[in-house]
Image (cartoon, rainbow, N blue to C red):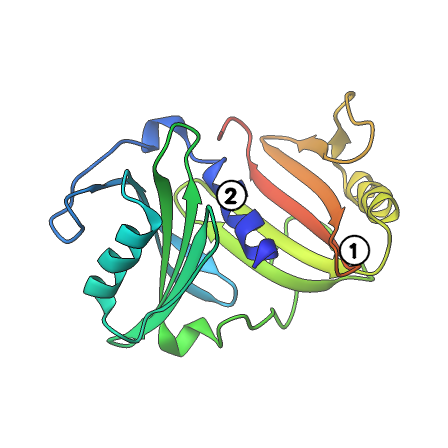
């Protein structure tokens, strides 16, 4: 879950500011506001992402989702965040609920046709982010692509140390014609080529696996 949540939060952080404004569609609870909606690629298939803001508590958000999807909804909640998944009318729905600093929650919703969504939690069969070199000693784990902003994120796994993974990735990206930022000192690194920008980073989890983030987007998209 941590890997998927990390990718979703990275995508949230790359929305163009002008694209985020609150709406009140007729098919959502009155206490929710829609902040964003866009077609996306998630893992191996296409789908749709929606971002909502709600002042409700986690239990009230659970009730709203159960009212929307019925008894088949799987809801897993911690103290401050939650995720949910369900299948309904030929679609696979995934939800991630994250707290807002000023109170309330962001609710991220992914909807995909079941025939193209794959199994929940299923890893990629190959690297999908083609705009950046992939670390040879890595296994693809998560991918999403925002068709509106052209922002692509892929997270891969390796048993290399984070430092070695980032160093190797940086060498591959520079050899591919990208210019590193002069402020790159390790950890999270930035590269530019023409009108495109790339970000890479790596973090080792408690399971001993290093997760590598590669992000590619047009220059100027925030």
Q: Quarter of the image for the N terminus: give it.
A: bottom right
Is 128 in front, or is 161?
161
Is 152 placed above or below 122 here? above
For disc 2, the marked residue is 9
Q: Is residue 218 above or below residue 89?
A: above
Image depth: mark 2 or mark 1 in front? 2
Front in this rendered view, residue 159 or 139: 159
Badge 2: few (under 14), some or many (20 or more) residues near its Cα, within 10 Å? few
User: Who's the residue at 86% across and 47% down the image?
Assistant: 168
In this view, 128 is above or below 18? below
In the displayed structure, would residue 211 be above or below residue 9?
below
Q: Secondary structure at mark 1?
A: loop
Q: Helix or strand or loop: what does disc 2 sit on?
A: helix
In front of the other: 38 or 65: 65
**182 lies left or right of 75:** right
Q: CA distance from mark 2 to mark 1?
A: 22 Å
Quarter of the view holding residue 95? bottom left
Residue at the disc numbered 1: 135
User: Does the rendering let one see residue 91?
Assistant: no
- Report the residue that reaches farthest toward the left: 26
Q: Position of residue 200 (x, y in %)?
A: 70, 41
Residue 212 horizontal/vertical position (percent): 72, 51
Disc 1 packing (10 Å; few <14; some 14–19; many ≥20): many
* Total numbered badges shown on the rendered structure: 2
How far from the left and from the top, in percent, is residue 89? 24, 76
Give percent across and percent down for residue 133.
73, 51
Q: Residue at x 42, y 74 (%)?
A: 116
The one nearer the camera, 37 or 151, is 37
Q: Is residue 30 left or right of residue 80?
A: left
Disc nearer the start of the sequence (2/1): 2
Identify the residue at horizontal 77%, vertical 42% (top origin): 173
């Amino acid at each position: 879950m941590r890997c998927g949540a990390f990718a979703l939060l990275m995508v949230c952080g790359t929305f163009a500011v002008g694209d985020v404004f609150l709406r009140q569609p007729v098919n959502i609870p009155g206490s929710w506001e829609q902040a964003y909606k866009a077609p996306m690629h998630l893992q191996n298939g296409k789908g749709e992402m929606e971002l909502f803001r709600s002042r409700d508590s986690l239990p009230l958000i659970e009730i709203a989702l159960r009212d929307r999807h019925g008894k088949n909804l799987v809801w897993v909640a911690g103290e401050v965040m939650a995720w949910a998944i369900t299948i309904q009318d030929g679609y696979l729905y995934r939800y991630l609920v994250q707290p807002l600093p000023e109170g309330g929650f962001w609710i991220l919703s992914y909807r995909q046709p079941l025939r193209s969504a794959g199994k929940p939690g299923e890893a990629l069969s190959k690297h999908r982010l083609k705009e950046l070199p992939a670390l040879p000693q890595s296994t693809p784990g998560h991918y999403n692509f925002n068709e509106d902003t052209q922002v692509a994120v892929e997270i891969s796994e390796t048993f290399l140390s984070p430092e070695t993974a980032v160093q190797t990735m940086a060498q591959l990206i520079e050899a591919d014609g990208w210019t590193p930022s002069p402020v790159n000192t390790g950890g999270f690194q930035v590269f530019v080529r023409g009108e495109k920008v790339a970000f890479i980073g790596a973090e080792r989890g408690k399971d001993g696996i290093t997760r590598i983030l590669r992000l590619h987007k047009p220059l100027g998209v925030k």
